[in-house]
Image (spheres, rainbow, N blue to C red):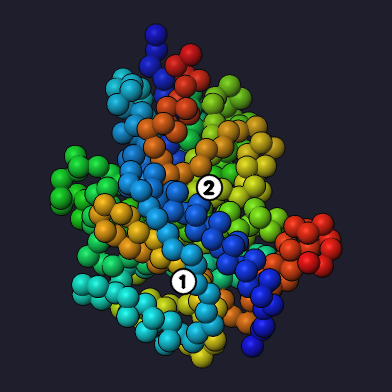
Amino acid sequence: MKPSTVLIVDDSRVSRMLTRQHITVRHADWVIEEAANGNDALVIARDLQPDLVLLDVNMPGMNGVDAAAALREMLPNAHISLLTANVQAATRQRAEAIGVGFMEKPITAERIAQLIAPLEA
Amino acid sequence: MIRLSDLEHDALVELFNIGVGQAASAMSEIVSETVTMAVPAISFLNRAAAAKLLASKSTGSGRICGISQRYSGAFDTDAILMFPEEKSQEIVRLMVGQAMPLDELTAMEQEAMSEIGNILLNSCVGALANIIGHELHGSLPDYHVGYSQDILALSGDSETVVLMLHIEFVVERQQIAGDVAFIMDMSALQDLKQHVALYLARAFGGEQP
């Protein structure tokens, strides 16, 4: 079975590091790429064609919601989820409206396990 | 000076209590420890008095690591999360685990503390926004180290009377205490008072309690 590819989009290096760590513990062979903002995420995603994209919302440049909407069109079959400290109902509603998931921070092993579960099925 | 009725005051304390409860829960997940919090105290203080209050509680060097975010929308506020400077590395260690070498940990301390601030402040403000039913837009976090007067001087006009919401939470086993302060000018406080009144009206079915 081909290893899955994951794109982590977060301006916080420590958040990217924690997310990567929680995925790698379970799947050392998965290909994981990182971007620090929405603009870079779109460029990387075009080549990588990730199976899963996890996006923070508040980032410099293109925010996570706008990037997720663009990625939803670019990658209709990918699993895409916001992974954010912004727990406001308005943000959850935006995620639902553009057809992506929502997971609140902080990043924990349990939350990452939930996010990658669709790729393990 | 804006006056709050007893009921509005109680409602305001309760709203921030719920918000900080969310933040304490997030903090507990970050550090994998029990986090307790005190009932929030609301006071109208000028910046100097607020700094004095914080300084009176400080331990160690007295220097504080502060992470601030500006929120605008339903009401405008500068939210500041504060920890004693000497505890910040300990907090980051709890967040990233024991495996990371010390030099790497030190290099990423500022960034990790900013992210912790981002998570905690957004947990708190997000809970508030959800209760009052209006969105609040947050800036990216700013990280500063200094004495309480330096940290509090980072926002607003030094002459403005501010509403200081002072909330302490404690990471029990590590003996780490932090504070959250929300600084608002009179115009923002007027907006907040209005939202509290609407919240009370909704909570009591439109009847004046």
Which residue does the image show at 37% across and 84% down from the upper left? Answer: B52
Which residue does the image show at 66% across and 48% down from the upper left? Answer: A90
Q: In which quarter of the image is residue B63?
A: bottom left
Q: Looking at the image, which is closer to me, A42 or B85?
A: B85
Residue farthest along the left direction in this orientation? B102
Q: Is residue A16 above or below residue A72?
A: below
* Chain hosting mark 2: A
Name the amino acid type tagged 2.
Val
Q: Is residue A28 above or below residue B112?
A: above
Q: Looking at the image, which is closer to me, B148 or B139?
A: B148
> Residue B28 at what x, y percent from top left?
38, 48
Residue farthest along the top direction in this orientation? A1
> Residue B194 at what x, y percent from top left?
73, 71
Q: In which quarter of the image is residue A99?
A: top right
Q: Are marks 2 and 1 on the same chain?
A: no
Residue located beneath label 2 in the image: A57
Q: Distance between the residues labelled 2 and 1?
A: 28 Å
Q: What element carries label 1?
A: strand
Q: How many labels does the image show?
A: 2
Q: Is residue B196 left or right of residue A113?
A: right
Q: Is mark 2 on a helix, strand or loop?
A: loop
Name the amino acid type tagged 1.
His
Residue B166, numbered label: 1
Residue farthest along the bottom direction in this orientation? B159
> Residue A64 at what x, y percent from top left?
54, 45
Q: Is residue A39 above or below residue B87?
A: above
